[in-house]
Amino acid sequence: MYQVFINFIKRFFNIHLTILVVCCLMGSGLCFSVEPIVAQHPVPSIPHAVPDLSVIEEGKHYRKIGPTVLLNKNVQELIAQDPGKIQVIEFFSYACFWCQRLHPIVNAWVEKMPSNVAFHRYPLQFHKQWVPLAKAYYVVKALGRSHELDPVFFKAIHETHINLPDEKLLQTFFAEHGVPEKQFLELYGSFTLNQEVAKANELGNAYEIAESPVLIVNGPSGSYIFSARMVGSEQGVIKVLEFLIEREAKQLPSQ
């Protein structure tokens, strides 16, 4: 009886310790890849309601990035693309649950963003399974079908639970959406596309992105980074974004 009791106690604590660890990880609000990707069902930790952002504070709702980031060649090339403009950069992944929620909100903003702003989007590659999805993003972009297919990818992964990081399934998925196998393979394996994927990874590393989705504003006074987790909601992201753009626009050279 004593041994039975000891075994019960061991099993009890093992089970509850596992639950505690899982809850702590899920409660972090960070979207990191855990195999299999299609099994991710994060518990929402970012409220739906827009928080009080009547006062937007550096260090709380956003933070300034140190100037050493400008030493990176890829960052220098990125900033040089849009002289005289404020850059907004989004880092995301099709595999990220929170990216799916933020995606339509950011897209709606991009459609009416000010003329003095340039927008760029880069896929993150935190995990080896995110690399095929980064390549898929650039295939979609090369096809000129981002507006149509980006939501389809998010839905397939997070609602239909298709394991799209599997390249065979990815090929089939594109075929089902009107992309011939030959065209897909040419784009997916092209030198140009692989350069784009490598560049996106370099930029993510240069900006030290450790969660997703993340937005960066490059302006005359420096670079600023923030996320829905920092701000408190997806809708709040737009408020912080517009706050930084309005502030940086005052320092742009007059046209």
Image (cartoon, grey):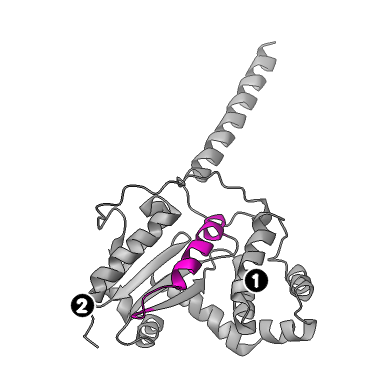
Q: Is residue 228 visible?
A: yes
Q: Is residue 67 above or below residue 34?
A: below
- Is mark 2 in CB contact (under 8 Å) with mark 1? no
Give the image location of residue 131, x and y in percent: 60, 71
**Mark found first going from the N terminus, 2 or 1:** 1
Relative to 153, 76 lies left or right: left
Q: Nearer the viewer, residue 139 or 177?
A: 177
The residue to which callout 2 is attached is 251
Q: Secondary structure at mark 2?
A: loop
Residue 248 lies left or right of residue 14; in this view the side is: left
Q: Which residues are magenta?
A: 96-117
* Tag 1 secondary structure: helix
Q: Which residue is mark 1?
A: 149
**Residue 217 percent coordinates (x, y):** 34, 71
Q: Is residue 79 above or below residue 222?
A: below
Q: Is residue 109 on the magenta stretch?
A: yes
Mark 1 packing: few (<14 Cα in 10 Å), some, or many (20+)?
A: some
